Image (cartoon, grey):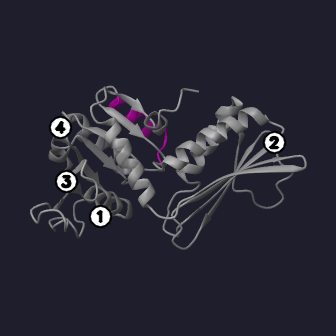
Amino acid sequence: MAMTNSVTKIGVLGAGGRMGRAIISAIASDPRLVLAGAIERAGHELVGRPVGPPFPSTLTYCSNHGPLAIASDVLIDFTSPIALAATLDAACDGKSAIVIGTTGLEPHHHALIDAAAKTIPVLQAANTSLGVTLLARLVADAARALGPDWDIEIAELHHRHKVDAPSGTALALGTAAAAGRGVDLVSVSDRGRDGITGARQPGHIGFASLRGGSAAGDHTVLFAGEGERIELRHLAENRDIFARGALRAAMWLAGKPAGRYQMDDVLGLPLR
């Protein structure tokens, strides 16, 4: 889909959810953006209803994302992993770029994204916050500089409704730490300690997941050495930061050649 010169047309998937509503609200306040359409799953109570002010009454929630992909410069997807295959098919058919913020993705989902990126520009991020993007870079640099003598623990807190653990952001931070050390996260990951676990394994990266209340997302990466500790931390006060980051990514992605991109590219961070 060719981008207009003045605005970027955004199609929002999962538009009735918490993130979808935050993205639509952010679009309404940014003159550089136009809401091309809002998608919810078939049978959702919002389908057929108007999106609401300040958008025209004719703009309603719908469940068919094929036409929306054609009408949009960029789709933004914060839905569920089970919906990803159909969403990518629609984006490829409609020649729309897509920003994917859905978490809980497994290797076969990433294979689908890799395949789609041969046809369209795709930016997939476990967290679209600009602050978290920078945090991941700092974590990788710290892990590289400090080496395996420093223990790494990652703690995250999210609202009571979050269904996956550790969070996608925590795993992304773990991946960054592992990359800084030149190791594969899967081989050094400790998740869910319980009972008599024995001493901590040297070089491993630990995870702890907390759930409660309405926390939008707190992440702390602890580097613990002999006699000293360093904490790198990001606190999300509300979902608006993820919406703003996703929209900045969408504006950056519109008009780019086919390929797979990341939030580092949006910030112009140099390749590692």
**Which residue is at a point 37% across and 45% down the rendered structure image?**
248
Q: Mark 4 points at which residue?
A: 4
The mark found on residue 102 in the picture is: none
Q: x, y (%) of residue 201?
A: 82, 44
Q: Name the residue under label 3.
A: 37
Q: Main secondary structure of the magenta part?
A: helix
Which of the two discs, 2 and 4, labels the residue nearer the N terminus? 4
Q: In this view, does 54 lie to the left or right of 162?
A: left
Q: x, y (%) of residue 27?
A: 28, 55
Q: What element carries label 3?
A: strand
Say what amino acid the circle numbered 3 marks: Gly
Q: Do the residues labelled 3 and 1 touch (CB within 8 Å)?
A: no
**Visible residue check, residue 12:** yes
The mark found on residue 150 in the picture is: 2
Say what amino acid the circle numbered 4 marks: Thr
Highlighted range, magenta:
105-117
Q: In this view, does 144 lie to the left or right of 169?
A: right
Image quadrant where residue 233 sits: bottom right
Q: In which quarter of the image is the N terminus?
A: top left
Say what amino acid the circle numbered 1 marks: Gly
Q: Distance between the residues labelled 2 and 4?
A: 50 Å
Q: Name the residue under label 1.
A: 16
Q: x, y (%) of residue 163?
A: 50, 61
Q: Distance between the residues labelled 4 and 3?
A: 16 Å
Q: How far apart are marks 1 and 4 (CA)?
A: 26 Å
The residue mark sitting in front, 2 or 4, is 4
Which of the two discs, 2 and 3, labels the residue nearer the N terminus? 3
Q: Nearer the viewer, residue 77 or 138?
A: 138
Which of the two discs, 3 and 1, labels the residue nearer the N terminus? 1
Q: How far apart are marks 2 and 1 (CA)?
A: 44 Å
Q: Which of 41 and 29 is in front in this view?
A: 29
The residue mark sitting in front, 4 or 3, is 4
